[in-house]
Amino acid sequence: MKTALYPGTFDPVTIGHQSIIIRSSELFDKLIVGIGNNSNKQCMFTLEERIEMLKKEVETYKEYQIENIEVVSYEGLTVDFCKKNEIDYIVRGVRTNTDWSAESSIVYANNMLYERVETVFLLADIDEIGISSSIVRDILRNNGDVSKFVPRVVLDMVQQKKK
């Protein structure tokens, strides 16, 4: 069984994340969406909110018979989580050359720590290249409309949080 991990902070989940999750679920028998719990990062949403956000989003995929996705959180190195759970693939979304440059350095380090792990890069859809969680957070902080950047389920949660 081919199992992959799609790791991230997901603060919040964007339509770019949504695209990578759906496309990855078609490539692997099981996809684990792993929310890295990095205490050094200042997140807008709590870990619990991000877990709930992703679980609600993934639940909507079941109407399309996508049922091979699991949402978990973890601490520590992503590669250590992979090793512990016998995950041989890491999925990463790439939007720009800057993403590619940063991600390729991580790939080399991961392979040195766990030789079995293979990283699979998926290019962002052209309409999603400019979308990132940090941009969404900035728009939210300034009371802007993020409806074009986040999935419907996430938008509902974001609007509830603003109240």
Image (spheres, rainbow, N blue to C red):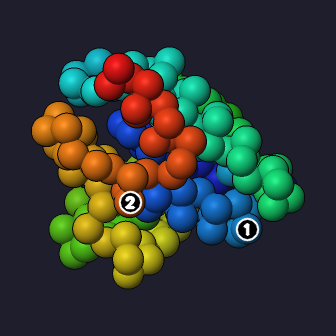
- Secondary structure of the residue carrying numbered label 1: helix
**Disc 2 residue crowd, few under 14, some 14–19, many 20+, Cα 10 Å:** few
The amino acid sitting under disc 1 is Glu
Residue depicted at x 31% and y 72%: 129
**Front residue of this view, candidates 141 and 128:** 141
Residue 73 place in picture, x, y as percent: 54, 27
Q: Which residue occupies the extreme bottom position in the image?
A: 126
Residue depicted at x 48% and y 31%: 157
- Which quadrant is home to the C terminus? top left
| Numbered badge on residue 26 | 1
Per the model, the C-alpha gap separating discs 2 and 1 is: 24 Å
The nearer-to-camera label among 2 and 1 is 2
Q: Decide if residue 90 is in sight here.
A: no
Image quarter of residue 32: top right
Residue 98 place in picture, x, y as percent: 19, 68
- Which quadrant is home to the N terminus? bottom right
Residue depicted at x 71% and y 69%: 27
Judge whether 160 appears above or below 96 on screen: above
